[in-house]
Amino acid sequence: MTVITIEQAGKYDGQEITIRGWLYNMRESGKLLFPIFRDGTGIIQGVCALKESPEAFAALKGLTQESSVIVTGKIRAEQRAPGGYEIGVNKVEVVQRVPESTPFPIQLKEHGVDFLLDHRHLWMRTPRQAAILRIRAEAERAAREFMDSQGYILTDAPIFTPAACEGTSTLFEVNYIDDEKAYLTQSGQLYIEATAMALGKVYTFGPTFRAEKSKTRRHLTEFWMLEPEAAYVELDEAMGLAEGLVSAIVQCVLKNKARELETLKRDTTKLQNVKPPFPRISYEDAIAVLQKHANPAKFGDDIGGDEETIISNEFDRPVMVHRYPASIKAFYMQPDAERPDLALAFDMLAPEGYGEIIGGSQRIHDYDLLVKRLREHNLPEDAFQWYLDLRRYGSVPHSGFGMGLERTVAWICGAEHIREVIPFPRMLYRVYP
RNA sequence: UCCCCGGUAGCUCAAUGGUAGAGCAUUCGGCUGUUAACCGAAGGGUUGCUAGUUCGAAUCUAGCCCGGGGAGCCA
């Protein structure tokens, strides 16, 4: 018997096949049953009549939600079935029956956030959550494919780090061997600056950790970040890479995950536009835009969530804001030669209010300036000796950025909260399950 | 750390000072084209915790606990 996945059902019209999955729901109508099966690739309606398949009917009758089943039957096009195809069930093997005493907790009705997060391991079985996770996988695949195609070499950065990249207040501290302290990485950037000097163009893609006491729809304490770094690349070129990367991800998801976007009821017309070039505006122009909208922002202010939305609403695709005041940016950012009070930094703001998905900059390559900045920020020079070595031995201008995977995927999916787009979200006050 | 909102049946919610209720889920019965199917019946409650006001508290007050949204900060 041919075993197929539900997403392939349309290719087997008229044929007898087997599906291995779970009972998602069942509608009963006397001597006729309409079980809905899911197998992780989609859902399909079954039909089972007592008169035609008494054994299969008996096996299905009263079967509980999420019981695991192997079903065999003929696929047929059917207007009345959700998805356009249904399976005429004539054989059912119940692999495990969910006991009536402990019914599956996730219903087809609405649930509260707390309940869903406590049951994340089961919540992810629903069509919407499964679609999101499949889109996330496609985004990761497309991102790697794009970086590889541009000649970037994947160099994985460490998770344990000896010191902070940007201050210690938001670090997770862990006991290393023999009571030594270590920290979970906030960013692989400093390390890939080293690998960039070794290999030219590199990137890292992995989990990062921030103990920020942030409770918003845009924050996780553990999230994935793709960070490219390239020698001899300056700010404008880094921005070009960023728009290419985001465009490639969006276009791949549109092309390869159309069914999942449909499941999410995502309005894809706004994603179609996401192609280079993206608009680029300076920080000072961004402040002017805000003031035009009667926002009290002035030079020197950081751009908050509401401000990001005002700016991104001016455009039909992501916008890049560049050359921020150096005073509000990180110690390692290269000052603009013509305006030393500005840092050669940029952020990419996603449309539709999703905010910052990329932050990047050109890095300081001058040894003396970097030492000066370390001291100004009261950072421990000893811990940064290896980093300063990169400026002692053949230092060159170089740039990079970090793209937050969950924020990017949340935007593409139109998700309300980034906790939906990672299999097991880690948030302030929540590490279960 | 700060501001705002919430906590009642397994789940989602109603009851605003006077007998704790509905839908879904579960159990039992009915139904041959259902679309979160529908119809009938049953079981299911220490109203987050503690104290106070009151003849009487899910409801008012205080403290605490838990959760959600946001600010700051960031991707």
Image (spheres, grey):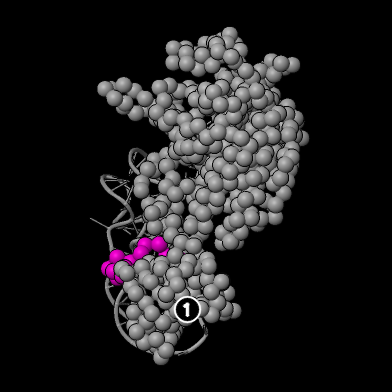
Label 1 crowd (10 A; few <14 / some 14-19 / many >=20): some
Residue A276 percent coordinates (x, y):
72, 41
Q: Provide the residue span drawn in magenta.
A: A97-108
| A309 relative to B14, above or below | above
Q: Is residue A355 visible?
A: no
What number of labels is visible?
Answer: 1
Q: Residue at x 54, y 52 (%)?
A: A135
Residue A178 percent coordinates (x, y):
26, 22
User: Is residue A221 within the magenta segment?
Assistant: no
Q: Secondary structure at mark 1?
A: strand
Q: Residue at x 53, y 74 (%)?
A: A12
**Towards the viewer: A212 or A364:** A364
Residue A4 percent coordinates (x, y):
47, 68
**Towards the viewer: A125 or A351:** A125
Q: Amino acid at mark 1?
A: Glu
In the picture of the structure, the residue carrying the numbered disc 1 is A16
User: Is residue A103 within the magenta segment?
Assistant: yes
